[in-house]
């Protein structure tokens, strides 16, 4: 997901305001979320941001235009239900910016509950799809298939499960040990065990542990806000879209053929949820984590690949 830089933020926020103006502006939740993003990430009072004029938009850089559309999409995912009067002005504005409308149209279908119809389109943009291809090219195709079979409950894979259970042998206070304790505390089966999460999907559990987010609907939203803000392309936006479909706009109840028991609507209307969501975005904008989880050896003694590398933006 592409978020504006400090330099671009005022222009981007002004364009987002301009896009929603013909529809009567933001609803209450959208207003609160954009105020939170403006204030938490950029130290800006949204009330001080004027609606961008056509002359200003004409001078906007391509990156600013794309950032604006990404924020517009997030605001659409948040709205439940999506107001009909929002649809045309937002699409017209995005088209005028010269930005691809594919993800915006996916957002519409997602918000209206047509997830099955556009699932393949989302997969086309998906980080998980790309990572599956990468890992297959690295010779891990059979391992990925075995992990998926265990996830669906067809058959457990003892080798994969043993690799993950070995996290229990990591040193006290290590990231790996904390992940094992996270699984044990919640009673979750490890990847490789029957119905244990697919290994690629399990990567997000490391963020649960790293950032201290629980497995509640709000915790899942915060995890994927953190992850989406760390990704510099549209794949992060897709991951966040799916999560908002599960826990905000109520359009998704199944992922990968499995029913998500804690799926619910309107999570961001819970007290303090918007502030914590924007804080998750801010945490990742402030500190970029590159966690080499894809190549973890899960050795009880090796912690090198479990150490987050930080770099200031």
Image (cartoon, rainbow, N blue to C red):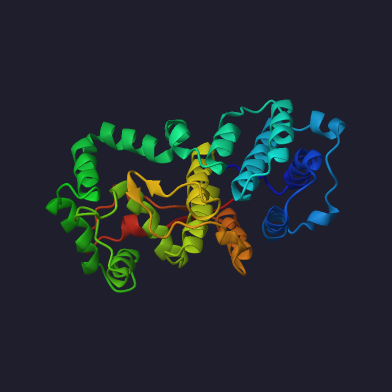
Residue 231 falls left or right of residue 142: right
- Quadrant for the N terminus in the image: top right
Q: Is residue 299 above or below residue 119?
A: below
Residue placed at 42% from the left, 64% from the top?
Answer: 215
Residue placed at 59% from the left, 53% from the top?
Answer: 285
Residue placed at 50% from the left, 41% from the top?
Answer: 238
Residue 198 falls left or right of residue 312: left
What is the tally of numbered marks visible in this picture? Answer: 0
Residue placed at 74% from the left, 49% from the top?
Answer: 26
Q: Is residue 83 above or below residue 92?
A: below
Residue 157 falls left or right of residue 103: left
Q: Nearer the viewer, residue 294 or 89?
A: 89
Image-quadrant location for residue 136: top left
Q: Is residue 12 above or below residue 310?
A: above
Give the percent coordinates (x, y) of residue 93: 74, 32
Residue 12 falls left or right of residue 125: right
Q: Nearer the viewer, residue 155 or 171?
A: 155
Image-quadrant location for residue 173: bottom left
Give the percent coordinates (x, y) of residue 206: 38, 59
Q: Is residue 122 visible?
A: no
Image-quadrant location for residue 4: top right
């Amino acid at each position: 997901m592409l978020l504006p830089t400090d330099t671009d933020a005022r222009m981007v926020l002004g364009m987002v305001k301009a896009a929603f103006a013909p529809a009567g502006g933001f609803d209450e939740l959208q207003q609160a979320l954009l105020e939170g993003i403006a204030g938490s990430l950029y130290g800006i009072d949204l009330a001080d941001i004027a609606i961008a004029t056509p002359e200003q938009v004409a001078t906007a850089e391509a990156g600013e235009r794309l950032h604006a559309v990404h924020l517009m999409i997030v605001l659409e995912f948040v709205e439940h239900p999506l107001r009909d009067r929002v649809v045309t002005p937002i699409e017209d504005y995005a088209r005028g910016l010269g930005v691809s409308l594919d993800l915006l149209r996916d957002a519409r279908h997602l918000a209206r509950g047509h997830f099955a119809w556009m699932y393949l389109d989302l997969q086309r943009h998906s980080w998980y799809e790309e990572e599956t291809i990468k890992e297959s090219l690295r010779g891990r195709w059979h391992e990925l298939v075995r992990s998926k079979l265990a996830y669906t409950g067809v058959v457990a894979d003892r080798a994969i499960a043993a690799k993950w259970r070995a996290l229990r042998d990591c040193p006290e206070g290590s990231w790996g040990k904390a992940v094992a304790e996270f699984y044990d505390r919640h009673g979750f089966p490890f990847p490789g065990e029957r119905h244990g999460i697919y290994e690629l999907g399990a990567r997000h559990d490391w963020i649960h542990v790293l950032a201290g987010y629980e497995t509640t609907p709000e915790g899942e939203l915060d995890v994927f806000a953190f992850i989406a803000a760390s990704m510099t392309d549209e794949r992060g936006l897709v991951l966040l879209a799916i999560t908002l479909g599960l826990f905000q706009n109520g359009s998704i109840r199944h992922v990968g053929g499995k029913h998500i028991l804690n799926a619910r609507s309107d999570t961001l209307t819970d007290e303090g949820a918007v502030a914590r969501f924007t804080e998750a975005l801010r945490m990742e904008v402030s500190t970029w984590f590159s966690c080499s989880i894809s190549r973890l050896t899960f050795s009880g003694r090796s912690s090198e690949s479990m150490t987050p590398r930080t770099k200031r933006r």
